[in-house]
Image: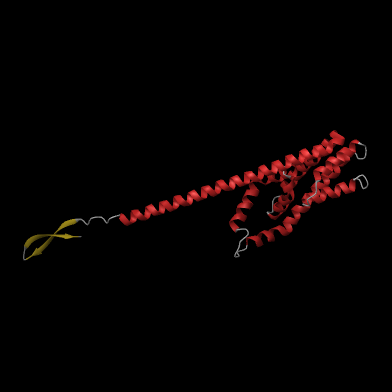
Amino acid sequence: MQTYGYPVIWLSTFLAAVGLPLPTALVLLAAGAFATLGDFNIVVLIAVTWSASVCGDNVGYWLGRRFGGPILLWLARPRKVRILSEKTLERGNEYFRARGMAAIFLTRFLFAALGGVVNLVAGAERYSYRRFLLCDVSGDLINVVIPLVLGYIFGVSWEAVGEIISGISFFALALLIAGVLVVYLVRMVRRTQKMKQEETGQTRLGEGVATKSLPDVPIVPRTSFDSGHNTLDSLPL
């Protein structure tokens, strides 16, 4: 970092935003700490890393927009072992369109490990580029300012701060996964209960049809004329 300066910081931040597993937070903390020593300018660092994050996220978005759709359709194609059903794909589209802005914004800094995946999904779902860019630019600004400023403030203690931030990120990610699993479990239980109720209703309906008796046929008098005499014969209709 001290040898190549801003270009290597921009490149590493860019590749991490595209989706490569690079420790961006630690790089930014170290850069902020070196700015304290006079190796970098903190304002220039913010501009460089912010532009790198936005460019990397946009590359991921357009890759998803260009190649993500056919991949998702291939996954949903009928086969012996279907990886992704068409119904699940439609529900995913509706869910992302309803909550896409929050998903994009939070994965810039709070759930940064999911940022690359969200970029691809946003592009594959043809999500509005204006909304994506708005959430991406604002979220990336928070993503670069926090570690750079913390590294700049704490200086030589940036490694300890990095461990704390990593722990918080893993904890937030674990909470997110746990929440998704709980929602999935609740939906599965509700679906099972609904199926049981439908089966019970159908069984009761069948029993009611089997035990239902036909209505009695009413008997009404009918008049017949035989050799001028009136006789009443009770005949069923």
Viewer-nearest residue: 228 or 34:
34
What residue lies at 67% left-to-right and 47% top-to-bottom? 100
Give residue 148's quadrant in the image: top right
**How is the rendered protein coloured?**
secondary structure
Q: Is residue 66 left or right of residue 73?
A: right
Give residue 74's quadrant in the image: bottom right
| Residue 145 appears in the picture as rendered | no
| Residue 188 appears in the picture as rendered | yes
Q: Is residue 204 left or right of residue 166?
A: left
Q: Which image quadrant: the N terminus?
A: top right
In this rendering, the answer to whether 62 lies above or below 110 is below
Instruction: Identify the residue at the far top of this view.
Output: 153
Give residue 168's quadrant in the image: top right
What residue lies at 80% left-to-right and 37% top-to-bottom? 161
Q: Position of residue 138 (x, y in %)?
A: 76, 41
Q: Is residue 195 left or right of residue 103?
A: left
Q: Position of residue 172 (x, y in %)?
A: 70, 41
Q: Position of residue 183 (x, y in %)?
A: 59, 45
Q: Which image quadrant: the C terminus?
A: bottom left
Viewer-nearest residue: 131 or 144:
144
What residue lies at 63% left-to-right and 43% top-to-bottom? 179
Viewer-nearest residue: 96 or 17:
17
Q: Position of residue 6 (x, y in %)?
A: 90, 45
In this rendering, the answer to whether 189 lies above or below 155 is below
What residue lies at 46% left-to-right and 51% top-to-bottom? 196
Report the number of numbered marks: 0
Q: Is residue 128 left or right of residue 196?
A: right
